[in-house]
Image (cartoon, helix red, strand yellow):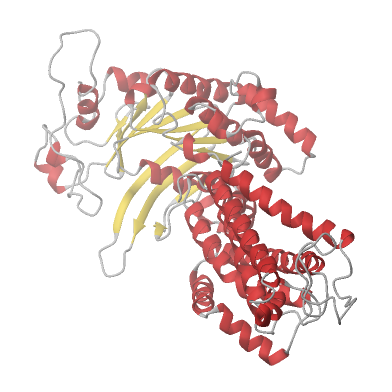
Amino acid sequence: MTDLLEVRDLRISFAPPGAAPIVPVDDVSFGVAAGEMVALVGESGCGKSLTGLAILRLLPRGAQLGPKSAIRFAGVDLATLSETTVRPYRGARIAMVFQDPMSSLNPVMRVGAQIVEAIQAHASVPFSTARARAIALLAEVGIADPADRVDAWPHQLSGGMRQRVMLAIALAGEPDVLIADEPTTALDVTVQAQILELLDTLRRTRQMAVLLITHDLGIVAGRADRVLVMYAGRIVESAPASTLFAAPQHPYTRGLFGSIPRLDGPVERLASIAGVVPPPGQWPSGCRFHPRCPLAVAACVATRPPLVADTAAHATACWVTAGSPT
Amino acid sequence: MTGTLRAGLVLGGGLVLLAIVGPWIAPDPLAQPDLITGTLQSPSATHWFGTDQYSRDVFARLAAGARASLGIAVGAVVVATLLGTLVGLIAGGARGAAAEALRRAIDLLLGLPRLVVLLVLLAAVGPLTPLSLALVLGATGWPAIARLVRGETLRLRETGFVGAARALGASPLRILRRDILPGAMAPALVAATLGIADAILLEAGLSFIGLGIQPPAPTWGGMILEARDHIASAPWLLLAPGLALVVATTAATLIGDALRHRLLPGTR
C-alpha cells in the first residue's frame, strides 16, 4: 500500500531571539495510506499537535521546518509551498478538525451557513446546491433532523453534535486526508465513542486517510490500523494497533499501558512512570526517555537509539528491548 | 423586550415621528407672520409651544430642527461606523509595520479633542451644509469605533473558529469578512448607537456657538442660542429645544444600553 501522505524527517524548531533554539519535534517520519487510520499518541507537549499542524503549514509564528523535512502529498512536497500556494490544499485535500468543538464554530453564524461557507470556499456552486449538500453532510455525520438542524445556532447544539458539525465542515471540501487533533478530548466518554465510530465509518465509506492525534491510548484500541507513540518530540514506537496492544516494546509504551486501569484483575495502585516529561529545550541526550526508564543502560545515555523495525511492521527506538521478546 | 429598550424606543420613536410628521402639520418654520403683536407668545392652541421673538412658531421650528439634528447625527454616526469598522478591521487583521502605524494613527486621532478639531476646521472653511456637517462629524468620530473594532478583531483572530477556518483553506480576507466582521460589528453597533447622543450634542453645541447650521434654518442648538436673551420672559423658547435634546440623548443612550445587554452579554 503506498502512502497518500508521507511525512519525512519532520523537524520543527523555534529560535527565540537571544536563546538557544528549541526543537519540539525532531526526526519524525511516517505515512498514512488512503482508507487507513493512523493514531499519533503521546503526552501533552510531546509534539504530536505540532506535527499535525505542520502538515498543513499551520505552525505558529516563529516555528521553522527543518531543511530536510518533507511533507509529501499527491506528488507535492507541502513543506516547500508558500502560504498562498498551500492554501488550496487546506480543506480541499487535507482537512483538519480540532479539539474544542465549542470554540471551533463561529457563534454568530448558523451551522448550515458555516458548512455552506466551507463548500463554497472550495467549489463555485450555487447556494441552493450548497445548502442541499450541507444537509446531506449533516446526515452523513449522523445528525438527526438535518433539514432542521441546518438552521440551528452553535449554542443550540451539544458538544457531540458540534463536533459532528465540525466533521461535516471538514468533509465539505471532500478531503483525501483528515487530521483529527484530539477530536474527542472535550467530549463526554459515551460521546467520544460515537465520534470515533463516526470517524471510523467515514474513512471506510470515503476511503479517506485519517491521522488521529490523541493522548488517550484507550480510544485508539480497535479503531486505528497503526499506532505511532511519540515521546519528547520523537517517535519511539510504531506498530500495528493489534501488535502494539498485545506486545508493546518500548519501555515508555509499556509504562503507558501499565497506567491504564483494568476491569479484570485485582484492584491495586496504578503503575505510573516516574518523573515528568521534560520541557523542550531540556531534553536529555541519547534516548530522551532514559532518565525515567527502569531499564536504562549506559548506551541509552550516550547514543540515541534509532527506530528499527524488528518485524515487518513493528519498529521501536530502544537499545534494550528492540527485537527482544517481551 | 426589556424596559430599557422599550423606553428608549418610545422616546426615540416619538422624536423620529416629530421629525417626519411634524413639518407637515406645523406652519412654515421660517414664516414671520406678525412681527408687531405675534412675538414671544406663550404656548396656546394655535402655537403649541408659543412663538419666538420673530413671531415664528416654536413647534414648527422644533420639528424642522429635529429633522436637521437627528439627520446630521445619524449621518455622522453612519459615516463614523463605516470608516471606523473598515480601519479597525485592517488595523486588527494586518501584521507588522502597517498594523503598528495604523494603531498609532488611531491613538493619535483619539488623543485630539474632537470639539477643538471641529472648531479649527469650521473656523477655517466656514459654515457647512447639513450634509457636509454630517460628513465632518463622522470623519472626526471614527477613531473611537476603529479602536473598538481593532480590539475585537485581535481577540477574534485568536479564536478556535478562525483557526479552523484557516485550517480549511480560507484566505485572510475571507476570514476577516466572514468570520471576524460579524463578531466585531456588535461592539461597533453599540458604540454607534451611544455615539448618536454625542453627535446630537456636538451638532447642537456647534450651532449654539454659531459654527453649525446657520440661521434662519432651524436647529435645536440654534434655537437655544436665540432663546438666550428671552430666558426670563419666554422660557418656552429654551425649554422646547432643551427638552428635545434631553429626550434625544436619553433615547440613544437607553437603546445603546439595551443593545449592549443583548449583543455583548456580560458587559456593563
Q: Residue B146, how many percent across, how many down?
A: 57, 66
In the picture, measured across the screen, residue A301 lies left or right of residue A152, that is left
Query: Residue B170, relative to residue B37: is it above or below?
Result: above
Q: Residue A102, how many percent across, how many down?
A: 47, 36
Q: Residue B40, how many percent across, how many down?
A: 77, 75
| Total residue callouts | 0
Identity of the residue furthest to the front in this view:
B37
Is residue A133 in sight in this rendering?
A: yes
In the picture, measured across the screen, residue B162 lies left or right of residue B28, that is left
Q: Which of the 4 quarters of the picture holds residue A206?
A: top right
Q: Residue B143, how many percent across, how many down?
A: 57, 71
Closer-to-camera residue (A44/B75)? B75
Is residue A166 in sight in this rendering?
A: no
The structure residue drawn at horizontal position 48% and vertical position 23%, both measured from the top left corner, is A195
Closer-to-camera residue (B7/A63)? B7
Closer-to-camera residue (A16/B68)? B68
Query: Residue A27, relative to residue A247: is it above or below?
Result: below
The structure residue drawn at horizontal position 57% and vertical position 78%, both measured from the top left corner, is B114
Q: Quadrant of the C terminus of chain A?
A: top left
Query: Residue B97, relative to residue B26: is it above or below?
Result: below
The structure residue drawn at horizontal position 49% and vertical position 70%, both measured from the top left corner, is B96
Identity of the residue furthest to the left in this view:
A298
Query: Residue A11, relative to residue A299: is it above or below?
Result: below
The structure residue drawn at horizontal position 23% and vertical position 17%, both measured from the top left corner, is A261
